[in-house]
Image (cartoon, rainbow, N blue to C red):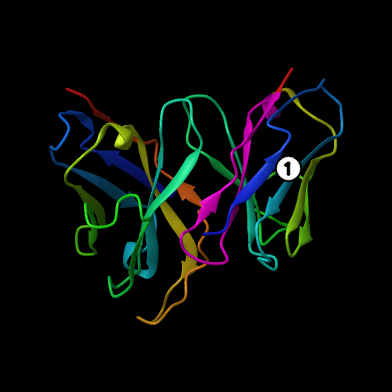
Amino acid sequence: EVQLVESGGGLVKPGGSLTLSCAASGFTFSNYNMNWVRQAPGKGLEWVSSISSSSNYIYYADSVKGRFTISRDNAKNSLYVEMNSLRAEDTAVYYCARDPRYCSTTSCYPDYYFDYWGQGTLVSVSS
Amino acid sequence: DIQMTQSPSSLSASVGDRVTITCRASQSISSYLNWYHQKPGKAPNLLIYAASSLQSGVPSRFSGSGSGTDFTLTISSLQPEDFATYYCQQSYTTPLTFGGGTKVEI
């Protein structure tokens, strides 16, 4: 069974930093592109970042570019996002989500949608 | 960026009703359109990918259609567990973008 479990959320002051983790199990993590998607309280979904299976392709939403860094450790079946210079508008539930395309090579164009999601972790940015 | 516009933003329906939700893209996205539903406090769940392909395990009362800029999600006979918020999402290009959501209420 595919499982994605996020952790690391919490309360942080504006300008602060936080790193979220996503532990993956039930599939060969190293063969799938992964994503972060967030949802502000009472709002819709916003894609944050994508990383390819071998970390050679990384993309960010403009709203987080230069402040967030996505990474992965395939040996640990884990996805991360380091968030710096946090703002009130970054307050959201952060989900990790899997791209469904199985990547057998390092050059693998993703499907760019999300077939499995974690339960989410809440990040609150407030003084 | 490609803007995704859903309508209506909310609707009221009864069990057994046929429900249709529309999603419009600000430019052509071919068939790179996906649908999710989300219940309060839960993660989104993939229903339809590539405009009309039913995700494994999703009931056949859900169907999707459309291409280019205009897309439709149809629930043929609404069930109690279908009361949720529905989102469309384009997978044509980054930044990946979602519609604003359609809340289906009793």
Task: Write down the region rendered in magenta.
Answer: B81-104
- Image location (x, y in percent) of residue B55: 65, 53
> Is-magenta flag for residue A42?
no
> Is-magenta flag for residue B93?
yes
Q: Quadrant of the C terminus of chain A?
A: top left
- Image location (x, y in percent) of residue A3: 39, 46
Out of A27 and B24, give the one closest to the viewer.
B24
Q: Is residue A61 above or below residue A119?
A: below
Horizontal arrangement in the rendering, residue B89 relative to residue B14 (left or right): left
Asked whether residue B52 appears in the rendered view, the answer is no
Name the residue: 59% across, 39% down.
Answer: B100
- Image location (x, y in percent) of residue A100: 50, 62
Horizontal arrangement in the rendering, residue A80 relative to residue A120 (left or right): left
Name the residue: 21% across, 52% down.
Answer: A67
Asked whether residue B96 appears in the rendered view, the answer is yes
Q: Quadrant of residue A34?
A: bottom left
